Amino acid sequence: MFSKVLVVCIGNICRSPMAAALLRERGPQGLQVCSAGLAACVGRDMDPLARVVLDEFAVPAPLHEACQVTHDMLRWAQVILLMEQQQVQNVVQMAPEVRGKAF
């Protein structure tokens, strides 16, 4: 089993913070979850519409500040979840050693 998940999208203001919030809320106890972006809107909060969707499903939307994915984050994660196949390829180009844990 794994305990550290990194969720990655492009801007880190919609998809990855929403997925991270869902994993925190509905994943196993003790699961550590972070999110980041490949071309992050660094410093921005989660998109307001993304918060509305989470609210509709009773998923707490914590404070969020978009951040750029780093090699340290990629190494930290036991599993890396991406939103598109091209993003998997981008991450593997950045850090070939994560090939087996990026999906």
Image (tube, rainbow, N blue to C red):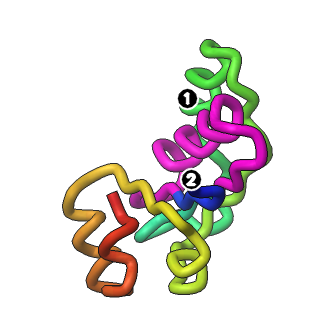
Quadrant of the image occupied by residue 29: top right
Say whether residue 78 is left or right of residue 64: left
- How far is disc 2 from disc 1 in space, using C-alphas? 33 Å
Image point (50%, 43%), residue name: 14
The vertical placement of 94 against 22, above or below, is: below
**Residue 41 percent across, percent down from the top left:** 53, 63
**Residue 30 percent across, percent down from the top left:** 77, 48
Q: What residue type is labelled 2?
A: Met
* Marker disc for residue 82: none
Image point (23%, 71%), residue name: 89
Q: Nearer the viewer, residue 57 or 28?
A: 28
Q: What element carries label 2?
A: loop
Image point (67%, 50%), residue name: 45
The vertical placement of 26 against 38, above or below, is: above
The range drawn in magenta is 7-33
Say whether residue 70 is left or right of residue 103: right
Q: Nearer the viewer, residue 56 or 92?
A: 92
Task: Select label 2 or label 1 by which is in front.
Answer: 2
Quadrant of the image occupied by residue 58: top right
Q: Name the residue under label 1.
A: 49
Q: What residue type is labelled 1?
A: Leu
Q: Do the numbered discs 2 and 1 sit on residues whose CB atoms are within 8 Å?
A: no
The residue carrying pointer 1 sits among few (fewer than 14), some (14 to 19) or many (20 or more) residues within 10 Å by Cα, namely few
The vertical placement of 96 against 35, above or below, is: below
**Residue 37 percent across, percent down from the top left:** 48, 64
Q: Which of 47 and 64 is in front in this view?
A: 64
Q: Name the residue under label 2.
A: 1
**Residue 39 percent across, percent down from the top left:** 42, 70
Q: Is-magenta flag for residue 87?
A: no
Q: What element carries label 1?
A: helix
Decide which of tag 2 and tag 1 comes sooner along the chain. 2
Say whether residue 23 is left or right of residue 92: right
